[in-house]
Image: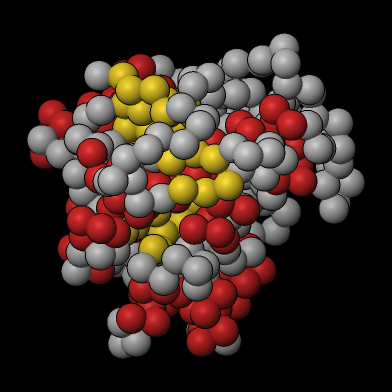
Amino acid sequence: MKHKIKSLVIMSLLAVLSVAVAGAQNTSITLDFPNWKAGESHFDEHEWTEVIAGDIPLVITVPHSGTKKPKEMADRTCKDEQGRLVRGWDRYTADMAHAIRNAFLEKYNKSPYFVINHVHRRKVDQNRDIVAVCGDEKGEEAWNNFHIAADSAIADVLRKFGHTLYIDLHAHGHENQRLELGYNLTKEELQKAFKKEDLKKYAAKSSMSNYIAKNPDTDIWELLFGAQGFGAFISKEGLPATPAMQDPHPVGDERFFSGGYNTRRYTSSEHPNVFGFQIESNYRKVRDSKANMKLFAEAFGRAYYNFANTLGL
């Protein structure tokens, strides 16, 4: 069931979140999330952002899945602080999200929340700060729609459960065919953490820091490299991952994505009841066919519930 989320304020006594849209005058979006029902799809008025409401404390954002290239939205041309302009999309990650949802419903009769971007990265990068839209007004509107939707989904989960695991879902093209789990720790920091160097510092820097702050007996080494970590659970499902007990960290010149803007934003101290990580998915045996996406989704569900049990969620 699809519901439009209008760009103007929806006047409702139940509306509890209203956030000003940067770059647009006298415009705001109100997401009436207390009325959301699990399984419903909610869109902004342009259908640039989609939210699928769930009923477990897991929010999955899919920022680089978009294929739409609105003519009224300028192409991105400005480079980031490293002098890069990345405009490639994460192929089939929206399909992965739907496969995950279907697998959860089939096995558990429950589903995570999903926030899915439908605008191509050529137009807007939903895993960068708003400056990455290069000042384009429509790009700023799309950026705000996505992040207000993510804020709203998280707020709805927190209202119901008090906490949530957060995952930012991506796709990589690196040679090593494994899942890359980004905890806001670089490969060099993972190498040091595996040797149990500066663990307190890396625990505070990691995207699990909010969980650790509320559960001070938690061992970050065990979460990253132990038998009860998400990496270990998903690897046992036949899906190689790092960091994990089976593959603690990248080595040498292996490329690795450690977590981006979304992971830093939504697991920061401004969201003290949110914790999680970024997943960069490889292509072979994960995204290369519908059959493999289904198998991945089923394995992801089992790994999620095992990890949730570890965390006591």
| Colour mode of the rendering | secondary structure
Residue ID at (64%, 64%): 186
What residue sits 69% from the left and 27% below the top? Answer: 138
> Residue shown at 70%/58% (left/top)?
252
Give the tally of numbered discs.
0
Residue 12's place in the image compared with 207, above or below, is: above
Residue 80: x percent and y percent?
Answer: 82, 47
Closer to us: 183 or 105: 105
Is residue 172 in view from this perspective? Answer: no
Q: Residue at x 86, y 41 (%)?
A: 79
| Of 101 and 172, the residue lying toward us | 101
What quarter of the picture does the C terminus occupy?
Answer: bottom left
Q: Position of residue 124 (x, y in %)?
A: 68, 32
Q: Answer left or right for 255 relative to 193.
A: right
Quadrant, the N terminus: top left
Residue 19 horizontal/vertical position (percent): 52, 49
Asked which quadrant contains residue 239, the reply is: top left
- List x then y, in percent, for residue 242: 48, 55
Towards the viewer: 20 or 173: 20
Q: Does residue 229 sit above or below 5 in this rendering?
A: below
Residue 290 seen:
yes
Q: Residue furthest top?
A: 71
